[in-house]
Amino acid sequence: MSSSQASWWPLTVAALTFITLVGCDVPTGNSSPSVNTDTEISTPLVQEKTFTFLGGPNSEFDPLIDTTSSDFDSLFEVESSNNDISVVQEIDNFDIGNLNEALDNATGSLTFDQKTLDETFIDLKKEGFTFAGEKQIEDLNVELQVSAKADIPVRGSRVAFRKSQNNYVELGPTTIEVQNITSSPTAPGGVFDSLRFTYPDIRVEPYGEDNQLVVDFVENPCGSGPCGSNGEYERDMGDGFRIDLEGARIYPDKPNIDKNGTVTFNIGGQVNPDLMVKNDDKISLRASTSFDNFEIREIDVYEAKPFTVTITPNENGGDINVANDNEVRTAAFDGFEGITDRVDGLKLADVSLTFQVETANLASTDAQVHAAIQGTNETNQIYLRGTEDQNMSRGADRNVSSLPFSAAFTENGVSLQNESLIKLGVGLEEAALGETVRTPLLVDGDNSNVSDFVNTLPTEVRLAGQAEINTDGGGLQVRKPIALDANFSLNVPLRIRDRFVVRDTIDADLSDLNDLTDPEEDANISTAELQFSYTNGLPLGADAKMVIVDAAGSVIETFNGGFDNDNFRIEPAAKDKDGAAAAPSSGTFVFTLGSTQEALRALAEGDKIRLAFNMDQAGSGGGSEAAARLRADDQLTLNRVRLEADASIQTGN
């Protein structure tokens, strides 16, 4: 180094040192340096989770609805060939029972009066006989074969019988009596050698014209039953008789409903030829015939006025009170019990019920069941209401309607209007006595509010009603025991009408967020979010709600609580013409967690994510307008759920 260089070098170093010191911050209190660090979090929380719509604990994938649970094991049915789902419910235990009062209501006060016959067969004085003392009657020129006819009055104003139609009344444990038989003149050997009572309008089995009720008075009866050579009953001469007519049929002559009729009986006999008579004697007979303990067990009539019969108890005989447990029959839709534990707002489309009316021993007639049918659950109640059937091809005899209506129903003293009731018509013109007839009636959107009724998801059904029989006033056949019962069956494809919500919970450890929330550090958070990617094979879309909870299950924060942000949307699969999924959709949606350390600090305690999917049909592709039809193996897959965060963290000052 030259001497000149040696002179300026120390000055130069000193100057540079000064400049460097002026250009730097010199810490005065903390000697630690200030450091900016870029931090990135990318944590997979779920690596592909697939849900099937229906399933059980042994299913390959987690079901949205567990059909093996007690809530749903009797609600859904899956067709093995194609996995189509049907919603199935049945009520078959209304236990309405017998309608034996229907027979009494049909016949009204039909009665067969007592008839007293007082007949003079021979009047010797009037015939001009004059002789002294006594003579044997066989010595006189008189006809000893005698006969008479009498009519038993039949009264009633509800039914008509035509002999040309062989209309009849079949008797229960009824007896016919003939008593107070007296004859004149009094004679030791009796007035008559033989005497026969014939009832041509009363027949015993097998009810042919040759099976008339005949009673012969003879000296040595053959027995108490129909033991004569032609099935006649035999009794001692001079006695009355009492004969059990259970199972016998009476064929009245009563062609007009509003007029009385008759049942004929004849008396014939042979006067004792040895009878000693005077010239002023009268050969006569007096006897009374009547039915005792009269009971009808079957009728076949030409015409009968319409009549009603209660099919559920009616304690006071007046209005039917639906709120009175003693006047209703109840049954349960078991499969709807507890459905809201996993699903909210499930609404089915294309809903119909089959209402099967079962009758026995009603024939050649019709029955109109007038009913108040109330469905209830824990929070709601609804009546199954009939409307005038828009599908008239069903026929008037199967009309399901609330109009017209004759029964009076109340609920806690308030009259129920027709619009809250339903009438189910059953045609029995081709039915036969002795057989049970099951008539299925379709209750659907054409004739009722059945969709609203079923979609209330009632857990109990209350039925109160009465039946109107023979509404056209025509012919009628009725036999005890008379039975009427009813059951519901619901079996429809699982098609969704509106929205419903399903819920699921996934494990989600968000503790990695602690890297961004140290209070000793400043963080500039550019991204903090949960990313979801999906593949949807359901013919339903969904708006997603997310609730983050801690290990104790306490809610930390809710995202999209009102399902009103379209950014959190799962698009539906395209549908075919029947509404089933044809091609899956796929996409992503992102929940932003926050942009400050304070916002993320609580979320770092997150342990689980509760997801709720508000399922609907909006935006379904494929050009199909059909309601979504769900299959058991339709799948929704969350391909990935990932926690992503980016931040710049400054440490020190």
Image (spheres, rainbow, N blue to C red):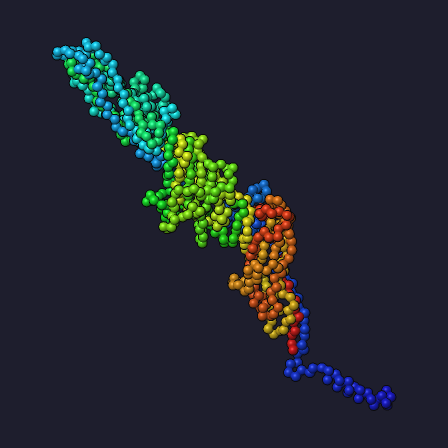
> Tag count in the figure?
0
Considering the image in quadrants, where does the N terminus appear?
bottom right
Instruction: Kindly tell me whether residue 175 is visible in this rendering.
Output: no
Instruction: Kindly tell me whether residue 348 is visible in this rendering.
Output: yes
- Image coords of residue 252 (percent x, y): 33, 26
- Image coords of residue 172 (percent x, y): 32, 30
Q: Name, please, the residue furthest toward the right.
A: 2
Q: In the shown orientation, is residue 375 left or right of residue 598? A: left
- Image coords of residue 422 (percent x, y): 44, 43
Question: Is 498 in front, or is 320?
Answer: 320
Question: Is 369 in front, or is 374?
Answer: 369
- Image coords of residue 17 (percent x, y): 76, 85
Q: Quadrant of residue 84?
A: top right
Considering the image in quadrants, where does the C terminus appear?
bottom right
Question: Which residue corresponds to the image point at 55% horizontal and 61% vertical from the top-left?
Answer: 561
Question: Which residue corresponds to the image point at 38% horizontal and 42% vertical from the top-left?
Answer: 312
Image: 310 above or below 126: below
Q: In the shown orientation, is residue 589 left or right of residue 501? A: right
Image: 607 above or below 420: below
Question: Which residue corresponds to the image point at 37% horizontal and 45% vertical from the top-left?
Answer: 320
Image: 491 above or below 525: above
Question: Is 81 in front, or is 544?
Answer: 544
Question: Is 420 in front, or is 324?
Answer: 420
Question: Which residue corresponds to the image point at 64% horizontal and 66% vertical from the top-left?
Answer: 527
Image: 488 above or below 40: above
